[in-house]
Image (spheres, rainbow, N blue to C red):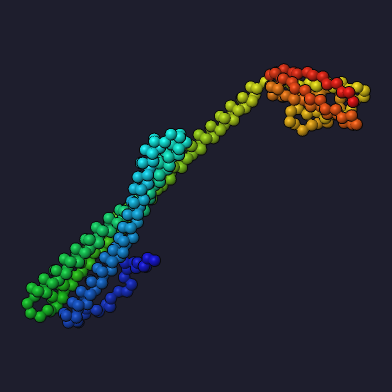
Amino acid sequence: MMAHKPDISTKKLSLWDQYKEKTPDVALKAIYTHVEDASTMMCGWYCASIRVKRWTSLGVRVVAFVLLLFGTTLPIFAALQDDDRVRLLFTQWAVALLVLAGLIQVADRVFGWSSGWMRYITTVTTMENLKRSFELEWARYLVSKAGVLDSADTRSLFDLAKALENELTKLQAEETTKWIVEFNSGMSLLESLIKTQREDTDKKLEAIRTSLTGQEGVAKAQESSILFGAVELTLIHKAELKTVQISLDEEAPVEFVGTVWSRLKVSPGLHQVSVQTFGDSQQTIQKVVEVSPAGTVRLEVKLTA
């Protein structure tokens, strides 16, 4: 589990009279301790942030490289396949992997993992160099001082420590400004990508709708262009009219009482007409007829029952 990283903040101000009426040795020790704690806190914050961004950036780069590797080699393997479906599948996977690699790189730019890593390294390196220069300047002053330290020495070394802390604070402010600029740039890039993708999706959706509308129009035109035929069946009863069941092809039989049964909008081609009577002497008659476009097929069925 990642340890909590404290913010760079001043929890409490130093005592207002921390350096007043103190001997130079006591005052200089307090000054040195203060600037040491402040610089260590600032550098430590950036060092902790560097570890997170470094591993995130490296992970993103490795994943993107692996996706690029497979996305580049899959079309080569696809060209070696004999089956068209396998070639198509390999090519589709290659395109998907390359798109995913590109999206990962976009995420790196939007969230600033790699650029933040570089920015933090530059900032903390400069801070460490300032700390080392401060240590050497402080030591040089003490070495070159002849005799006992006095209040003038305290003021000079205080100004030296103040200059270091001001430089560190300036670096922190500059890095924060760069972070804000990069954050706004990442947000603009994300908004631009979302807008572009939405517009592209809208165009594709409109194209699909237009295509479906065209297909429906073609289907209706084809349907209207088909010339249907008709079937006219004449029933010749032996005596009085009786109820019969009539069906066309695989349709459910319908009961009919009369002498002439007809059906409109019959598709051209061969059809089977079935007639079935009721009663003790049940009779089933089936006839095959050929319906021509815009034509009427007439047939007679004699009922013996």
In the picture, residue 87 is in which quadrant? Answer: top left
Q: Is residue 155 above or below residue 287?
A: below
Residue located farthest toward the right when viewing the structure as drawn: 239
- Quarter of the image where the N terminus is located: bottom left
Residue 273 locus on image (x, y percent): 77, 25
Query: Which residue occupies 19% across, 63% down?
Result: 129
In front here: 68 or 206?
Answer: 68
Residue 258 locus on image (x, y percent): 86, 25
Left or right of residue 249, residue 179 in this image:
left
Query: Which residue occupies 83% across, 27% down?
Result: 284
Q: Is residue 30 above or below residue 64?
A: below
In the picture, residue 242 is in which quadrant? Answer: top right
Determine if residue 106 is in view: no
Query: Which residue occupies 69% across, 22% down?
Result: 269
- Quarter of the image where the C terminus is located: top right
Residue 89 locus on image (x, y percent): 45, 39
Determine if residue 123 is in view: yes
Q: Is residue 152 above or below residue 44?
A: below
Residue 152 locus on image (x, y percent): 13, 76
Left or right of residue 133, residue 112 in this image:
right
Counting the numbered discs, the total is: 0
In front here: 182 or 212?
Answer: 212
Residue located farthest toward the left when viewing the structure as drawn: 146
